[in-house]
Amino acid sequence: VYKKTIFNTRQIYKLFRASNNRYAKMILMHMMLGTRPSEFLSIEKTDVKLRQRYLIIRESKTEAGRNRIIPLHKQTLPFWIEFLAENNKFIACDEHGIHLNYSRFRTKFDKTLIELNIKYHTPHECRHTLASLLNNVGANITASKRILGHASNDITEKHYTHKDLHQLKKAMDLIVFKY
């Protein structure tokens, strides 16, 4: 059984430094949203609110994950601007504008890691990475759960604790890379 591991800081920096690599950018966009791969692949350009710095995940395998707002990480904004300028319906498209399904995304993902000499990871480990990064910087646990689309078992947290976009951005903005 394969044990999931997160991307380490050195590996994340390698991805940021590969700014000419379309798929390195896509991996970082996926990672810094904390989405499931299927959620990332279903993001349409109309779901992204660049000026307000967030997007909406409309489809998810869980109720808590549907129609959730995720702030865009500041250091990935140039990537979002670039991908939004393309004439595609979906964000996750190849260099020819063809929407990536999971199999093609996984192939590009694996190839990019090999090219950058980054050890094996799965796309789902991007989600584990963001969860760990948020935890490591002391982000509010309720905000982290909302970003990741996790349901709460705690009645107070579930029904009485509300986090607005500003508070979600505040949690995301605690993560700063110095590459």
Image (cartoon, rainbow, N blue to C red):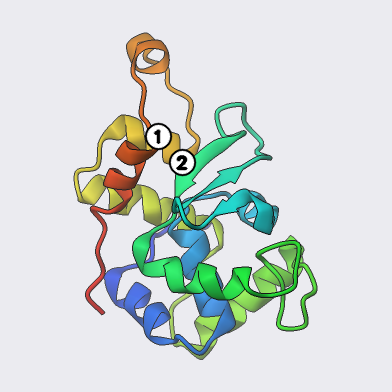
Q: Are marks 2 and 1 in contact (CB under 8 Å)?
A: yes
Indicate left or right for 45 with 71 as reference.
right
Residue plotted at (71% across, 71% down) = 93
- Note whether 21 is above or below 99 in the view shown: below
Q: Going 68% across and 75% down the picture, which residue do you hit?
A: 86
Residue 44 is at least partly visible in this image: yes
The image quarter in which residue 13 lies: bottom left
Work out which quarter of the rendered image holds the N terminus and state it: bottom right
Classify residue 168 as left or right of residue 51: left
**Which kind of residue does numbered mark 1 sit on?**
Lys
Q: Residues within 10 Å of mark 2 (few under 14, many from 20)?
A: many
**Tag on residue 145?**
1
Where does the image place residue 176, in percent across and percent down from the top left? 24, 64
In the image shown, does 120 or 17 lie closer to the viewer?
17
Work out whether residue 39 or residue 3 is closer to the camera in this orientation and state it.
39
Looking at the image, residue 156 lies above or below residue 129: above
User: Does dot 1 land on a helix, a strand or a loop?
Assistant: helix
Dot 1: within a 10 Å radius of its alpha carbon, few (fewer than 14), some, or many (20 or more) residues?
some
Q: Residue furthest left?
A: 138
Q: Give the quadrant of residue 88.
A: bottom right
Instruction: Identify the disc placed on residue 136.
Output: none
Which mark, residue 148?
Answer: 2
Query: Is residue 43 at least partly visible in the picture?
Result: no
Q: What is the C-alpha distance between the residues marked 2 and 1?
A: 5 Å
Q: Is residue 42 left or right of residue 18?
A: right
The foreground one among 82 and 10 is 82
As drawn, the residue found furthest toward the front would be 51
Which amino acid does the dot numbered 2 rest on? Leu
